[in-house]
Image: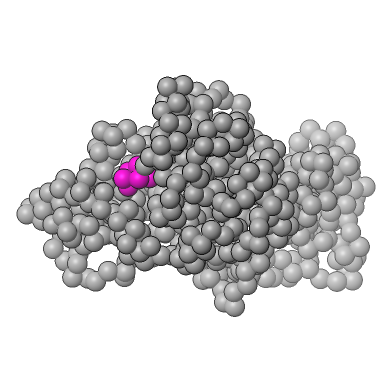
Amino acid sequence: MKETLKRYFGYDSFRPRQEEIITHVLQGKDALVLMPTGGGKSLCYQLPALLMKGTAIVVSPLISLMKDQVEALRANGIMAAALNSNNSETENSQIIRMTLQGTLKLLYISPERLMYALEGFLRDTEVSLFAVDEAHCISQWGHDFRPEYTQLHVLKELFPKVPIVALTATADKITREDILKQLQLENPSIFISSFDRPNIKLSVRRGYRTREKNASILNFIAQHPGECGIIYCLSRANTEKVCQMLRIHHIDATIYHAGMTALQRDKAQEDFINDRVQVVCATIAFGMGIDKSNVRWIIHYNMPKSLENYYQEVGRAGRDGMPSEALLFYSLSDVITLTEFARESGQEGINMEKLKRMQQYAEADICRRRILLSYFGEDIDHDCHHCDVCMNPPHRFDGTILVQKALSAIYRTNQQIGNNTLIDILRGNYRAEVTENHYELLKTFGAGRDVPAKDWNDYLLQMVQLGYIEIAYNEKNHLKITQAGSDVLFGKSSAQLVVIQHEEPTAKSKKKGALPRKEKNVFSEQAIANIDYNELFELLRSLRKQIAAEEMVPPYIVFSDKTLQQMALLHPTTIEAFGNVSGIGEYKKQKYGERFTNLIRRALEK
């Protein structure tokens, strides 16, 4: 097992739980594997496929996901292919022939095409194992349910002696139980790895309006020059607006949503994968099929509908283990929109509960990582010291007067106003809805003009979370005073609010290619004494991009950023030393060793 790991994948040791899972599969047993994105799920079926007789059949939901996986395997010298509609009939016929001949070690296939294959060529194929990737798609309780996955129970009926491995990065308890039931796994073992992604810094900013969000995003990207990222939006319109805003500020960006043609979506995805654009502004339709290892940051322009969605999307950053960031914006309008979605979903009860947990995460004043891990059934006894709450613990103040001003305005309008009108009254704005209803005559008109509108948005969010007001979703989202709010309004109790952390002005951009702070002390100081790290890293990136263009594959398929980083630190000048760098297997050592070591030698001679 370890010899195969080194030979094909270039690693000297397994990640947590991988060896245990692989051993289990090699014994012909069924398994459900829960492992975070970037945790090494794919290896749990790819390595057994190399060691077992026959062809492993990998059920995958997206063509783009299959394409990425197959390219990565072939780049490591492994015979793999994907049977899908993007291929010509000639290509698919050749793939089927190779499968029947036993030439392929892994065959990727969609659940729809699998049903036809089971009636055809797979009956005459020696199948080593079945791997059901993105297994949460099989469950109606999963965040990305796909009806075509529900037919997969026939695998166990038709191939009772072939092991089935179901794999996913996100599944709560009810989803896990449903996966086991749907696939009819036989005495399966459930392997749950730590869901912790310590390389990702988690941050939330609440109450921002569009202008403040845009300024914050530009500030954020300025601190990540040349680094790829994804901005997730709830609506197609927002993806287009955010993309246009970025382009105005000379940031290479593209859009991706379900309203585009397949050709347009493919182009956007290819441009992002191949580093032709820095940012993709997308709805949740984007990302599940992306295996891009060098995504350095994720921004949620709006709050996701559940922690499963949030975790899955955040997990697309830092798959190579290098430091990455996740920034979430959260506003009252998001809560209103997502509540409407949940009520119209046909599963209002469970979706409202998931939304409530998402809100609790966004409003947290304790370590965010602990809340996230707890949701997936993993408890830790310490704070992460790497989220915004840990790094800037919230401070509270007596906000009774502020809360009373807001509640008084709601009370004096007979609780017939929404969030925006309330802020206009408090700020003393003569907007149409204010003057039409003569709200400018209220005693509270302008009572909060000393507080910026953005801060009022934040305070009102806190008031909802603290239970002082609630939103009447069936009454045009009007704000209603609760009993707890009434007690504050009439002086029976006080209110503690969190001090708002105002964003710092745009920070100086860190030098492109600079060594991330988390990795600084991984290697000895003497290893970088003779050459400038930043300069060599950029030279290596340029060579990688050149090779990727020649081979028509994404740059990260050639080598990950993490592997390039180790080359820049260790600067191997011989083929043997090159092969000792983590992430470089025998195939890549022979294929690329000369070009990279020549470049490093030239850099050292300068």
Q: Which of 282 and 365 is in front in this view?
A: 282
Q: Does the magenta stretch include residue 75?
A: yes
Image quarter of residue 292: top left
Q: Does the magenta-highlighted stretch encompass residue 399?
A: no
Residue most extreme to the bottom: 381
Question: Who is closer to the viewer here, 12 or 349?
Answer: 12
Which residues are drawn in magenta?
A: 73-78
> Is residue 326 toward the left or the right of residue 177 in the image?
left
Q: Locate residue 171 relative to residue 126 in the image: left or right.
A: right
Given residues 238 and 7, the one toward you in this image is 7
Q: Is residue 474 left or right of residue 386?
A: right
Please tell me which residue is depicted at 21% across the width and 46% down the height of the picture: 592
Q: Residue furthest left?
A: 605
Q: Position of residue 182 (x, y in %)?
A: 71, 49
Tag count? 0
How is the rendered protein coloured?
A: one colour
Q: Position of residue 314 (x, y in %)?
A: 54, 52
Residue in the image at 66% along x and 58% along y? 186
Residue 285 in which image quadrant: top right
Residue drawn at (43%, 53%), measured in percent from left and top? Answer: 52
Q: Where is residue 325 in the image (x, y as percent from the top left)?
A: 48, 55
Q: Residue sitting at 73 percent across and 46 percent down?
A: 140
Along the horizontal axis of the image, is 185 left or right of 130?
right
Near-viewer residue (221 or 445): 221
Rendered-image quadrant of the N terminus: bottom left
